[in-house]
Amino acid sequence: MKVYFNNSCKICKAEINLYKKEKIEDIDWVDITDNSLAEKETSRNSKQLLRRLHVKQDEKVIEGAEAFLLVWKKIPKYNFLYNFFKIPIIFHLFSFGYEIVAYFLYLKNKKQLKN
């Protein structure tokens, strides 16, 4: 599984670093900052990659709140998050909240995009 994240975003980096500490061999962490290979691998442009967390698993690209579920499911220490946030009504609220936070982080970090 590959996780595509924005390492230049302080909040994103801090969260991903927590996950990286767990040293899960099945996860390949990919910084999307100025990364044309990530764009090619995901079939997403830099704006789309910057906008949300992305996971590529079994050649399928998943983004946003659903991508977080996949990450949490893979990391034993965070399975409780997966089990809680996968509950349909909770997932719906989480997804809505994630989109709001992700949008503001995108606005904060979009200056890194090449025009």
Image (spheres, helix red, strand yellow):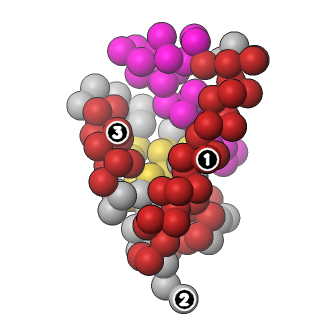
Residue drawn at 47 percent across, 14 percent down: 79
From which residue to which does the magenta span run?
A: 60-84
The span from disc 3 to disc 2 (Cα, nearest Å) is: 28 Å
Kind of residue indicated by mark 2 = Asn
| Residue 69 lies in the magenta stretch | yes
Q: Which picture quadrant has residue 10?
A: bottom left
Residue drawn at 48 percent across, 24 percent down: 72
The span from disc 2 to disc 1 (Cα, nearest Å) is: 24 Å
The span from disc 3 to disc 1 (Cα, nearest Å) is: 17 Å
Residue bearing the label numbered 1: 100
- Mark 3 / mark 1, whichever is N-terminal: 3
Residue bearing the label numbered 3: 15
How many labels were placed on the picture? 3
- Mark 3 / mark 2, whichever is N-terminal: 3
Residue drawn at 48 percent across, 10 percent down: 80
- Mark 2 / mark 1, whichever is N-terminal: 1
Kind of residue indicated by mark 3 = Glu
x and y, in percent, of residue 112 in the image = 42, 76
Mark 2 or 1: the one toward you: 1
